[in-house]
Image (cartoon, grey):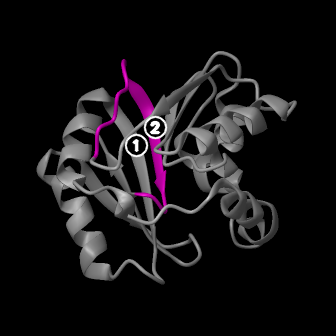
Amino acid sequence: MHRSPWWVMEAFDRTIRGLFWDAEATVAPYVASGDRVADIGCGVGFHSIALSRLVGPRGEVLLADVQREVLRRAVDRCRRDPLARAPLTPVLTDVGGDLPINGELDFALVFWALHEVREPQRFWRQLVPHLRAGAKVLVAEPILHVRRQRYQDELRPAEELGLARAEVDDIAFTNAAVLTAL
């Protein structure tokens, strides 16, 4: 499976990404100060910084990615931002869907990453038990290379595990949904 090198991700984050998405505006409706959140497929930290700012020093941000160097850069970017003050927990994952996290989450973000997971059903089976009642998962997939049917197939296991789904229409160039743990 193709993985973008860290420098491509960093260039995308620092040039193009901010033109189309406001990271804080994307995640702010779903998180609060003190929350424990996960940025799954965090890349070099575009949304991780916003999550850290929003949950603050009483919260926690789990940064999860399959590439060690990308994960290191995301953590470094968060630590350099003076407003991103949440404790950080880096989590090295694998493309099969293993998600080695402990404890409960209030929110998880999976932005342009779920299509890279080989076994979405396994991914959801590992994530759902870590969601508190009422926790939200925001999934956004790129419309340019993830067909609508594949997007639907990626979310079906989450719904089968009992997450309630609501589509989100205001994230540019994506199919997106919020899934809520009941």
Amino acid type, mark 1:
Lys
Q: Which residues are magenta?
A: 97-113
Instruction: Give the residue drawn at x 62%, y 45%.
Output: 70
Is residue 27 found left or right of 144 in the rendered image?
right
Does residue 85 lie above or below 67 as drawn? Answer: above
Q: Is-magenta flag for residue 125?
A: no
The quadrant the N terminus occupies is: bottom left
Amino acid type, mark 2:
Phe
- Residue for badge 2: 107
Task: Report crowding for label 1: few under 14, some 14 to 19, many 20 or more residues within 10 A (C-alpha).
Answer: many
Res 136 label: 1
- In terms of image quadrants, where is residue 135? top left
Does residue 78 lie above or below 155 as drawn? Answer: above
Instruction: Give the residue drawn at x 36%, y 64%.
Output: 115
Q: Is-magenta flag for residue 99?
A: yes
Instruction: Give the residue drawn at x 66%, y 54%.
Output: 6
Name the N-terminal-most of marks 1 and 2.
2
Q: Position of residue 114 (x, y in %)?
A: 37, 58
Instruction: Give the residue drawn at x 19%, y 45%.
Output: 122
Please report contact status of discs 1 and 2: CB closer than 8 Å, yes or no: yes
Q: Nearer the viewer, residue 158 or 135?
A: 158
**Helix or strand or loop: what does disc 1 sit on?**
strand
Q: Position of residue 15 (x, y in %)?
A: 81, 68
